[in-house]
Image (cartoon, rainbow, N blue to C red):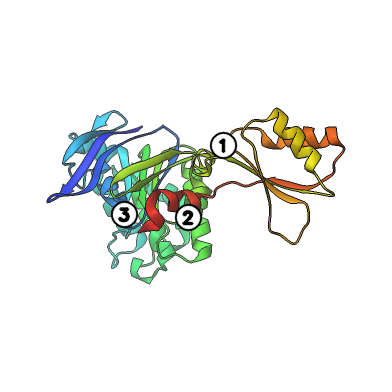
Amino acid sequence: MIQANQLSRKYGEQFAVENLSFHVHRGEVMGLLGPNGAGKSTTMKMLTCFLPPSSGEAFIDGASLHDSITVRRRVGYLPENAPSYSDLDVHSHLKFVGAMHGLMDATLTDRIREMGVLCGLDHVMYRRIDELSKGFRQRVGLAASMLHDPDCLIFDEPTTGLDPNQIVEIRKLIRRLGEKRTVLLSSHVLPEVEAVCDRMMIIDRGQLQTMGTARELSRQARGEALLHVTFKASSEAVFDLLRESVKEIGVELRETDTPHSYAIHHPDPDYPLAEALFHAAVSCGSVILEMHSEQATLEDVFHKLTGGGQ
């Protein structure tokens, strides 16, 4: 649905986005992560034809960015601060936006009604936008971005300025939208991305650092298989047996209040370390009181790839 090839944008001699390539599949929710100034908003402005790329190319459902009219018809865009005519009521604003998209009156009436229900606006449809809370103004922006029924939605920081309850509501809405549409979601709020996205990519200083599911990114950041285990009694026999069958294994005593607690690691992050340890313990008649794998969080990945956002 979205295909970017070596997409770049320069301001003077400075790259805001440099040689960015990625693909978002149809019906997928993709998260675009990065620290402030990483190039997220610039990327979205290029994909929605608000900014021309300095070089490279991108396609939205097969339409080139050079064909901006077609791209705009296929994309629904919610900027970080959703623009609206605050002196209009919600219905009048949506009617104006729909008319700008060329929707006929009969179709537009049905679409406004559908978006009102979908975005939870039906009971505030005739209130002035400047009387609404930040959460409802954000919903108005979402409704406006979807009026022309685009297959691709691009949202830039959709939960900025919302309270925790509003954030949860917008997350649920985006998740529902992702069931039928392709969504590219920009955010630097990591729990938000984990909650709604199928895959995510991290950019820093305008360049792609990594892309994948949360599990794939965690595995990349971890770099090794790491297991924490606590035995009921001394376990040297278990480790001796484990070292015979598993090469390159490392065992360290953990500094905890619990005796017989160890960290076990292997350089291959996909190695079935827990299974090997369990079989060794059974063979030696040792009792495992606790065992769990340690995984890198999305925050760990983010900090590792972006230098802590600096």
Three-letter amino acid code of the residue under disc 3: Pro
Identify the residue shown where x is 52% and y is 40%. Answer: 223
The quarter of the picture where residue 56 lies is top left
Q: What secondary structure is found at the residue carrying circle 3?
A: loop
Residue 30 location, quadrant = top left
Residue under pointer 1: 267
Q: Residues within 10 Å of mark 1 (few under 14, many from 20)?
A: some
Mark 3, residue position = 79
45 relative position to 233: left or right = left
Query: Where's residue 120, x and y in %?
Result: 48, 56
Circle 3: is it few (<14), some (14-19), or many (20+) Cα within 10 Å? some
Q: CA distance from mark 3 to mark 1?
A: 43 Å
- Residue type at mark 1 is Pro
Return the residue at label 2: 170
Q: Amino acid at mark 2?
A: Ile
Closer to the chain start, of discs 3 and 1, is 3
Count of numbered badges drawn on the protein: 3
